[in-house]
Image (cartoon, coloured by chain):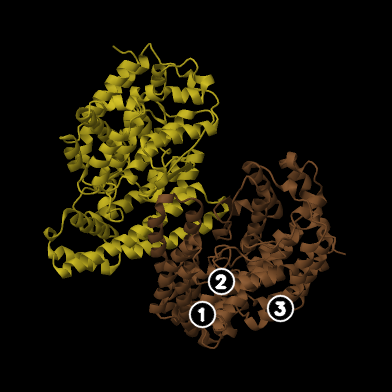
Chain colours: A brown, B yellow
Amino acid sequence: MKQATNTHYQHLTEKLEEISYLNGVMSTIGWDQEVMMPSGAANARAKQISSLAGVIHERLTDAALGDCLTVLEQTGLDTFDVRQRCNIQEAKRNFDLDTKVPKKLVMAIAELSSKANTAWVTARQENKFSDFAPYLKQFLALKKEWAQCVFPDKDIYDANIDLFERGTSSAEITPIFERLKSELIPLIRTIQAAPFQPDTSFLQGTFPVDKQEALARKISQDIGFNFDHGRMDISVHPFCGGSHPTDVRITTRYKESDFIESLYAVIHETGHGLYEQGRMPGHQDLPVSESLTMGIHESQSLFWERMIAQGQPFCSHYFETIRAAFPDHLRHATPDSFYRAINTCKPDFIRVEADELTYPLHVILRYEIEKGLFDGTMSVDDLPEIWDSMMMKYLGIKPPTDTLGVLQDSHWSGGAFGYFPSYTLGAIYACQFYNTLLKESPDSEQNIATGNFKPIKRWLNERIHSQGRLYTPQELVLRVTGEALNPDYFINYLKAKYTAIYQLS
Amino acid sequence: MKQATNTHYQHLTEKLEEISYLNGVMSTIGWDQEVMMPSGAANARAKQISSLAGVIHERLTDAALGDCLTVLEQTGLDTFDVRQRCNIQEAKRNFDLDTKVPKKLVMAIAELSSKANTAWVTARQENKFSDFAPYLKQFLALKKEWAQCVFPDKDIYDANIDLFERGTSSAEITPIFERLKSELIPLIRTIQAAPFQPDTSFLQGTFPVDKQEALARKISQDIGFNFDHGRMDISVHPFCGGSHPTDVRITTRYKESDFIESLYAVIHETGHGLYEQGRMPGHQDLPVSESLTMGIHESQSLFWERMIAQGQPFCSHYFETIRAAFPDHLRHATPDSFYRAINTCKPDFIRVEADELTYPLHVILRYEIEKGLFDGTMSVDDLPEIWDSMMMKYLGIKPPTDTLGVLQDSHWSGGAFGYFPSYTLGAIYACQFYNTLLKESPDSEQNIATGNFKPIKRWLNERIHSQGRLYTPQELVLRVTGEALNPDYFINYLKAKYTAIYQLS
């Protein structure tokens, strides 16, 4: 690399590192707001966040950054190694995303987000979709305008998806989701009609929060979460935040009546946390090490939550530990009955409470609605009716209110269209990754059954976490598993698992 | 006010508010570092803080801010009301402080701070003053240079004092400290020789941390700390931080062997916290509402810790509550014996552990050394010897090591010269304020004895907290108490109190 090029690249990384540090600060105060901030500080915090966001936006759209990128691109990207090239390309993509949208539109979206969220909260409380509908319409119009600015060559819904699941389009998603529908809908029906239903009575009762907390912390640590580089706290909604790979913060919430929820939320967030803690060593402050997409992130949380912790080897390893925490309740349970009890399937109204079998149908319903709204085949005013009829078709139930139906999620009120598919893409990725792991290391389930999670964590660190943004998700899944994203693994896994649990054959 | 002036003033407040919000963010991540941050995140956090500090420095020294201030000053300050005038003057002072120092000097001081702190930590561990001495010499040279840049008309030590205790000079401090010496040294000697020594045996034992925490929280809340606008947590050294008057965060530390330390640290920090929570309503994001000086801030913490919580009415009100928390230890104690036990006087080596009677002598010793170093009558290399001989003269004891002597405080290793006097000025202010309170509201001690702290908190809110920076400390003490700072109140208080406790007459 020539000296001048070297200097330009160094300027770029200094700018990118500063942005990364300031984002770390933003992330810390965001965590603080959810976990620590006293209730009366909300107004002041909003102003602090807005000021810092202004500073970060200044840095992201700094003309000097743009000039630097132009010079580096003109030099020719083949002058750089793969990591450097990735940093330049990522910086360019972000710079474009941040500068191609006119300020007026940015402000209109920000203002609408704030208003629409307030309107959604009230509409949901009052079960009045018609009060939220006008905001949804405005959002669709603004998001169309936005898409034309940033990705003029893309279909509008695809442009929105690209923000969360880059390189993935509805042309790829639709056939996958169609397959899931054709397989899962009949399976769920069969399960509902099955004569055998697992006993879950021992999961009901009162489970002291301090025992839940100790259990969750132990298992998170066993799996590999590094508490020298992270924390575990309480928040209203579980999440994984923090400011840096050396400062990863997971949260959960505790209900005295349910220890499964807090425990599996911790395992889920630990999966996200391991991704963050495992980012590419030596490059942790640069874009090349950042997590790839929402779907890949979700694949890491679901890998641990579902593929491992909802599996038989895990249940058999931890059963005695869990029974020791709650001896009265689990006195007559067994590893097998515990495994069955945490893996029941029951169609219900709320996505975030859904089991792994019904969850994809909640996602597909939203995907089809978003697609319909953007291509004009559905209209906002018809959504409650569309929602209910799709719920009947996919899950055989009809929500009694819009609060339990079309108004349940916050995503649309913040303008996040195209986000939902990532949840189910994550589940499919997770299953395909797990399948490869079993092929490459046939002793993995034996390791899980003896609590030896190190080789699995190492495998994920090497194959996924440390790869950052070097590859597209499509390239990554091919590199890791030897084939393109393939929903068969997920479908076969669900069919085999639930056929056994519900004694269907 | 003319339209153009109005516009300029509005620009100024927008800039000042942005700085205030960003400082709030900085303060939150500073708190997080002490209270929450995982140990392995220190490097990343240092970079985050440095990036944010760079942004804040940019804002503070923004040429547009300077231009705005010039225009406003040329307009004539009498165009503005007192609060507006104060904002302009404070902004001007800060702008000058931040821009009058050449960048080279700023960087040299920052670099030396970092190195000197590391050197101090090691020198202190190894009891080797000579390893720290070169850094101290460099600091003195740089701080002289700094003083000539920012306050060219001031004596150099006075310039350093001004940073913490503006408007207060050694010409004012020296006679006050001389009076304290002449009164307190003989009093301490007398106490040491007194035949009666209070029983403190019931303060020794094991005091469960959860009981300590509950007790401290209750008393902090009783006094008036608003937990909707604040928090209480644990840190290595107790402090009062937070990001805003609606987000004030106090900390303490717990030892199982000593509940007095944690409890009185919480009361002390609550005093600081009440100052912050009580800042001028409607102006909380502007300089006019900021706390006045270190000495006035300390007066508020010591007002509650010493004037109130170490007094008889407070001890009599809370004795049963405290005994209920630790019934085994306090079984045979009484409100009076408790009061005496927490008010013993014993010369010792460490300033931060000193009682209220010996504390001023620790401060005066440091003040005289700083003065001597800046006026050239003392040299760095002689400090250990000077320190020890002054300790003998003032407190009758000689530290066995420099670690317990001249190396004990962190202040000089960070370049904070002129800070120490504020601690004792704060104690004198506190006593004079308390005396005025008793004169104006003779039922105050009756209120304390019944746990009714509201009128006292209101009085401090009105007279001090909400006055922000409208007056100099000299003006404030005159307005509140009707006279200038007068050490007689403090001296008379100490004499009367300790004469009674030690049965000296």
Pointer 1 or 2: first along the chain: 1
Residue nearest the viewer, comparing A13 with B264 = B264
Pointer 3 or 1: first along the chain: 1
CA separation in Å, label 1 and label 2: 41 Å
Give the amino acid at mark 2.
Pro
Image quadrant in which you'd find residue A423: bottom right
Residue A451 visible? The answer is no
The location of residue A158, given as percent across then percent down, is 58, 81
Image quadrant in which you'd find residue B298: top left
Decide if residue B130 is on the left or right side of residue A340. Answer: left
Same chain, labels 3 and 2: yes
The location of residue A476, given as percent across then percent down, is 69, 75
Pointer 3 or 2: first along the chain: 3
The location of residue A219, given as percent across then percent down, is 70, 50
Give the numbered dot on residue A384. 2
Give the numbered dot on residue B367. none
Same chain, labels 1 and 2: yes
Decide if residue B353 is on the left or right side of residue A369. Answer: left
- Residue named by callout 1: A92
Q: Nearer the viewer, mark 3 or mark 2?
A: 2
Q: What element carries label 3?
A: helix
Q: What element carries label 1?
A: helix
- Residue named by callout 3: A178
The location of residue A214, given as percent across then percent down, is 65, 44
CA separation in Å, label 3 and label 2: 22 Å
Q: Which of marks 3 and 1 is in front?
A: 3
Residue nearest the viewer, comparing B484 with A5 = B484
